[in-house]
Amino acid sequence: MQSIRVGDLVMRKSYDGDVVFKVVALTSNSALLRGVDYRVMADAPLNDIVACALPDCPEGKTSKGASRPFDTKARSIRAGKAQ
């Protein structure tokens, strides 16, 4: 079994890799996941996820660079700097 770490990009095998997630937390047998392109949280057993490097992620399932632009926009809104 491959080693999954916090921060890795992964896909769920049981859902045919429909969404690319970032691992945000790990337990001994499961992972808490946050969607890269979609605002979604999920959990999955470790044996159901597979690592996915950005160049290898399926076309259209993640933005190149995964910069999370909506996080940047949310921080600027909270800081009162939104335009």
Image (cartoon, rainbow, N blue to C red):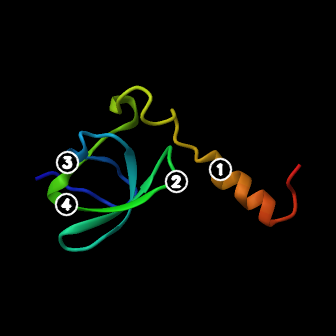
Q: Do callouts 1 and 4 mark residues in contact (Cβ within 8 Å)?
A: no
Q: Could you tell whether 60 is left or right of 9 in the image?
A: right
**Alpha carbon separation for disc pair 1 and 3:** 28 Å
Mark toward the start of the polypeptide (3 vs 2):
3
Residues packed near mark 4 inside 10 Å, few (<14), some (14 to 19) or many (20 plus): some
**Alpha carbon separation for disc pair 3 and 2:** 20 Å
Vertical side of 3 occupied by 27: above or below: below
The residue at 64%/46% (across/down) is: 69
Of the numbered discs in the image, which one, if any, rests on residue 14? 3
Q: Amino acid at mark 4?
A: Leu
Q: Give residue 10's position: percent from left, percent from top.
A: 31, 48
Q: Give residue 79's position: percent from left, percent from top.
A: 82, 65
Mark toward the start of the polypeptide (4 vs 3):
3
On the image, numbered disc 2 is attached to which residue?
39
Q: Give residue 75's position: percent from left, percent from top.
A: 73, 60
- Give the camera-side residue of 53 and 47: 47
Q: Give residue 72's position: percent from left, percent from top.
A: 69, 53
On the image, numbered disc 1 is attached to which residue?
70
Give the structural element (helix, strand or loop) at label 1.
helix
On the image, numbered disc 4 is attached to which residue?
46
